[in-house]
Amino acid sequence: MTTRRETGMAAPHRVLILGAGYAGMAAAIQLAARTKGREDVRVTLVNPQERFTERLRLHTVATGQQVAEMNIPKLLEGTGARFVRGWVTAMDANARIVRIDDDRVLHYDTLVYGLGGVADTTTVRGVEEHAYTLDSAQDAEVLAERLARLGRGTVVVGGSGLTGVESAAEIAERHPGLNVVLLGRREPGAAMGPRPKAYLRATLTRLGVQVRSGIEVVGVRPDSIELAGGESVAADVVLWTSGTRVSPLAAAAGLTVDERGRVVTDAALRSVSHPDVYAVGDAAAIRQGYGVMHGTCQGGMPTGVHAAVSIVRALDGKRPKPFRFGYYHTPVSLGRHDAVVQFTHPDDSPRRVYLTGRIAARYKETVTASPWPTYGRMKRLPASGAFWPRGGRFTRVRGVR
């Protein structure tokens, strides 16, 4: 077959995006929309499944509630981007190749690395064998089936971060016959101001959730959790939400990573060791003035947009701009009709402003539902990627044009 190079035409620039999470999808949609109709760019998105994982709704799926199934190839229709279904099993950052399912090889000129985090099931003994996680809709559905069969008993949620809090509240509300115990090192809502934190704690108490803070879990057994000091807590079901880990592929490929395995980036989100690789979302260690960003949908989607815009700028012979991001809020659902929303400073420290109750629940639902229509809007209007929905209004993300 005659290639473009053989006919004197330049081969298209191959952009490969790994991972269709919130950040990877934003990168794919934004890049495809901004290069639509160009023959000098080819965009490919790789993900192990066609179904988009709404991580913000997994705690509701885990209690048997139905959510819409969002199809990745369908959203990409008309953009010119190609979808490849498969697991990324190896990378060679020097040769610029990615291996899919061990038997397929994809080449790239520019890579967007968006293989985000999953629950850390390796640090504590027995978690991998005996605990449930919320890494995918399938994981959540398996837990939902187990809870439905349980009827009565004790469910222990290991980890008092936001996922643990939302999961404990949802399970307690949906299954009032179960005894729900929330264990963690920190007090739930520890990063919130005094009043929203007190509201969160009071709501958990109202729902019947037993909260134990200052707890270190050292092991998980089939019927209990082992705590430091020798105490054990009986458990019919354990849901593990304590800590995340990222794929080891970046480190194995020779990219410079931090102590957690995240790709260390420069100001434009390029790998400091391999500038042809952009890292986005939970997979990236992105330093801002206030420190390294932590993984959230709130911050992940703008990184995907920025990477896409930077790639287009580079293709057009322009320098990518620095990425700048500030946090805005911390919305936490507490069952279907209650929530608390802590508004924050850009460094994620709490402001005095907060919402509670049904108005907070409506706000949280608006935030949770926003990614998919945002992708659709970016598909139609690429420039809209510079504006991000925050509680019903749009705010410009600095560094994106």
Image (cartoon, grey):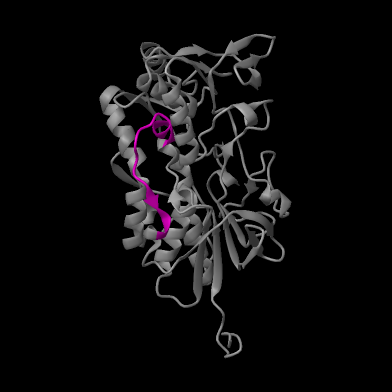
- In the rendered image, the vertical position of residue 111 relative to residue 337, given as above or below: below
The quarter of the picture where the N terminus appears is: bottom right
The quarter of the picture where the C terminus appears is: bottom left
Please tell me which residue is depicted at 37% across the width and 14% down the height of the picture.
Answer: 207
- Was residue 68 drawn as part of the magenta stretch in this picture? yes
Q: Residue furthest front?
A: 149
Residue 251, position as x, y percentages in the image:
71, 49
- Was residue 237 drawn as part of the magenta stretch in this picture? no
Q: Is residue 305 visible?
A: no
Quadrant assignment, res 54: top left
Q: Give left or right: position of 255 versus 332.
A: right
Residue 67, position as x, y percentages in the image:
35, 40
Q: Residue furthest bottom?
A: 7
Residue 30, position as x, y percentages in the image:
42, 60
Magenta region: which residues? 58-73
Observer-nearest residue: 255 or 127? Answer: 127
Please tell me which residue is depicted at 36% across the width and 22% down the height of the picture.
Answer: 174
- In the rendered image, the vertical position of residue 296 relative to residue 315, given as above or below: above
Observer-nearest residue: 294 or 351? Answer: 294
- In the rendered image, the vertical position of residue 196 relative to residue 232, given as above or below: below
Please tell me which residue is depicted at 67% across the width and 43% down the height of the picture.
Answer: 261
Residue 6, position as x, y percentages in the image:
61, 89
